[in-house]
């Protein structure tokens, strides 16, 4: 009996070994194919996704990304539900779904409300009785417009909303078929810049962000720097108060954690390569501890963000002995004061980075060496201001390091543009 059993065991052991080896080889050599849902081909989501595709595939050949255009956030979420896409880019105000997890905050997207110079529109309230181009239903811009209108007690009977795809909306503003146009886009978008210059339209201020945040807490207040969309004449003519939401990279919750961890690592460890392709990637930031991204964080992204954090006992062993200390109230007050100070420092540093991004766009669009030299002088003025702020503790050392990276990218872009101009000019 034993003599018959031993050969059978040998055969079974051999088959098991072959199976384990085959499985190891499969996992070790598997290529992951992911589709990322974005937006229209002329939009910022699509441009960022193409940059991400290039950098991820160059850094990890086992991950292949296909960029897929869509009609907006609702379609992106539906594709995640149906597993037609495994990654997507949406706005941070997008309602959460069980199939979707957050991966990373990307760049801020700014409310752009533009009005023709002959329209008589100088504020949101002036939209009454006017024709306003808005993005198609299902897009993030569409939803945000109606929330903005609601805040100003405007409904559909007060004006004429004209829902159009982006390019058709731009054409309608150029031809005067609408008086104003609303779209949420990354700051410094070249298409918006061309539209403002060609139509001489004005960007309108959004100056009630703090009150808007009472019902829409995902909004962020910012300032659109003078000259963001052109330097001569500057558009806008002065720093303009505005509102923004964050673009958010999300993924299907079932995607392998190791793959999402690698993509998250690529976003931040190789950000310089992303910025070289898509400059607005410089505005990406790591989420702060405990920050709510609007939906659950994917385990792969969480593994990246927490990889350098010490264990619970290491972090709190000494502090636990002070829980009943009489100094808790004092420490809490000091902590709140520090948070307010750091918030001011961060906002100041962000404004410099936005100015740098605006100068990069101006450099890329410049047509003469004097214009390029003027941009270079502006770059040096900003550097002097930032160094002064650092010396006077108006910004942190960490913010200065982030600024230094953006500043160097701008300087490189200007030098590259100068070389291109000189090489193309007649001898």
Image: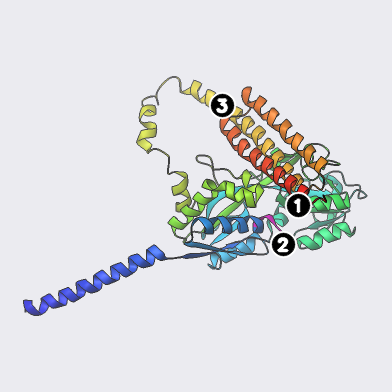
Query: Secondary structure beneath disc 2?
Result: loop
Residue corresponding to mark 1: 190
Residue corresponding to mark 2: 137
- Mark 1 or mark 3: name the one nearer the start of the chain: 1
Q: Are marks 2 and 3 in contact (CB under 8 Å)?
A: no
**Relative vertical location of residue 155 with respect to residue 403 in this rendering, above or below:** below
- Mark 2 or mark 1: name the one nearer the start of the chain: 2
Rendered residue at 53%/52% (across/down): 102
Residue corresponding to mark 3: 338
Q: For residue 132, which quarter of the picture?
A: bottom right
| Residue 76 horizontal/vertical position (percent) | 61, 62
How far, Cα to Cα, is label 1 from label 3?
38 Å
Numbered range of the magenta stretch: 41-45
| Residue 135 horizontal/vertical position (percent) | 75, 59
Query: Secondary structure beneath disc 3?
Result: helix
Location of the N terminus (image quadrant): bottom left
Does residue 72 appear to the left or right of 268 in the view shown?
right
**Relative vertical location of residue 102 with respect to residue 16 in this rendering, above or below:** above
Which of the two marks, 2 or 3, is nearer to us in this view? Answer: 3
- Mark 2 or mark 3: name the one nearer the start of the chain: 2
| Residue 113 horizontal/vertical position (percent) | 79, 49
Q: For residue 351, which quarter of the picture?
A: top right
């Amino acid at each position: 009996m034993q003599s018959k059993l031993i050969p059978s065991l040998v055969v079974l052991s051999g088959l098991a070994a072959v199976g384990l080896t085959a499985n190891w080889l499969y996992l070790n050599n598997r290529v992951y194919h992911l589709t990322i849902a974005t937006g229209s081909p002329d939009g910022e989501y699509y441009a960022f996704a193409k940059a991400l595709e290039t950098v991820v595939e160059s850094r990890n050949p086992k991950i292949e990304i296909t960029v897929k255009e869509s009609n907006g956030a609702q379609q992106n979420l539906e594709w995640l539900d149906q597993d037609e896409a495994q990654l997507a880019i949406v706005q941070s105000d997008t309602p959460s779904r069980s199939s979707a997890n957050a991966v990373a905050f990307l760049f801020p997207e700014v409310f752009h409300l533009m009005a023709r110079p002959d329209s008589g529109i100088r504020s949101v309230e002036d939209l009454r009785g006017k024709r306003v181009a808005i993005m198609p239903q299902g897009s993030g811009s569409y939803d945000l417009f109606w929330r903005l209108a609601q805040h100003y007690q405007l409904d559909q009977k007060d004006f004429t909303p004209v829902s159009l795809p982006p390019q058709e909306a731009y054409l309608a503003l150029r031809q005067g078929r609408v008086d104003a146009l609303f779209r949420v886009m990354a700051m410094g978008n070249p298409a918006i810049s061309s539209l403002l210059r060609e139509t001489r339209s004005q960007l309108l201020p959004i100056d009630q962000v703090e009150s808007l945040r009472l019902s829409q807490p995902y909004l962020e207040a910012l300032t659109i720097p003078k000259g963001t969309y052109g330097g001569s004449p500057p558009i806008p003519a002065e720093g303009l108060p505005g509102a923004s939401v964050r673009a958010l990279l999300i993924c299907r919750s079932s995607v392998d954690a190791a793959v999402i961890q690698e993509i998250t690592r690529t976003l931040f460890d190789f950000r310089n390569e992303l910025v070289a392709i898509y400059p607005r990637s410089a505005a990406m930031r790591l989420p702060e501890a405990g920050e709510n991204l609007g939906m659950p964080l994917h385990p792969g992204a969480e593994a990246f963000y927490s990889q350098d954090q010490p264990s619970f006992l290491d972090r709190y062993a000494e502090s636990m002995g002070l829980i009943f200390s009489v100094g808790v109230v004092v420490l809490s007050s000091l902590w709140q004061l520090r948070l307010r100070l750091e918030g001011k420092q961060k906002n100041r540093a962000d404004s410099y980075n936005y100015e740098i991004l605006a100068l990069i766009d101006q450099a890329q669009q410049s047509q003469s060496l004097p214009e390029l030299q003027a941009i270079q002088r502006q770059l040096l003025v900003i550097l002097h201001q930032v160094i002064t702020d650092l010396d006077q503790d108006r910004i942190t050392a960490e913010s200065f390091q982030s600024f230094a990276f953006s500043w160097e990218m701008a300087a490189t872009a200007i030098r590259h543009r100068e070389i291109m101009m000189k090489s193309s000019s007649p001898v």
